[in-house]
Amino acid sequence: MPNSDTIERLIDDFEILEDWEDRYRYVIELGKKLPPLDEALKNDQSKVTGCVSQVWLICDRSDGPPLTLSFRGTSDAHIVQGLIAILLRLYNDKTPQEIMSVNAGSLFHRLGLDEHLSPQRSNGLAAMVKRIRQDASRMAETA
């Protein structure tokens, strides 16, 4: 499964960090490492609805076969930018079918983030996952 090494390293990194403040800072650092998204791509089509912060996600498809998808994204909030970075590690370079079978909630539980996100952040995270899954479904239909 693509990216499993990256996800395992992420889990290992979180296990080393004992308190929530360190994990929070680490999430923010992950977000700072994302490449910037071109301003022209920050439009209504790429904007994720259901997030308190401004969030934009772009879905790119490979030439395949097999068809794989990768995502780019950004936010105007540092912690949300970090959550995007985690989601990209989880979903990038997967087929639409793999994306539909990924349980993001399980990863966020393993990282201990699910119990430390505010209800608004949790709703925003769910909106981002929903958008990724919608993009995967749409790409599978056009393949």
Image: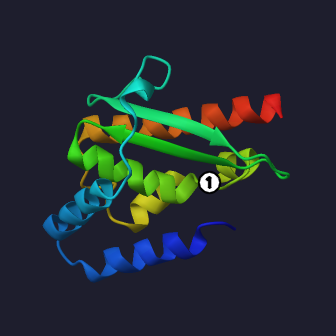
Residue 66 spot, x, y in % from top left: 83, 52
SS under mark 1: loop
Q: Residue at x 41, y 58 (%)?
A: 108
Residue 30 point in image, percent of width and height: 32, 61
Circle 1 packing at 10 Å, graded few (<14), some (14-19), many (20+), is some
Q: Nearer the viewer, residue 40 or 98?
A: 40
Q: Nearer the viewer, residue 84 or 33?
A: 33
Residue 131, placed above or below residue 66: above
Q: Position of residue 97 (x, y in %)?
A: 75, 47
User: Residue 137 falls in which quadrant of the image?
Assistant: top right
Residue displayed at 40% across by 34% down: 38
Query: Where is 31 relative to 73, above or below?
Result: below
Q: Amino acid at mark 1?
A: Val
Q: Quadrant of residue 61?
A: top right
Tell me if 47 is positioned left or right of 96 in this view: left
Q: Quadrant of the N terminus?
A: bottom right
Q: Which residue is mark 1?
A: 102
The image quadrant that residue 111 belongs to is: bottom left
- Residue at 67%, 38% (x, y): give it: 136
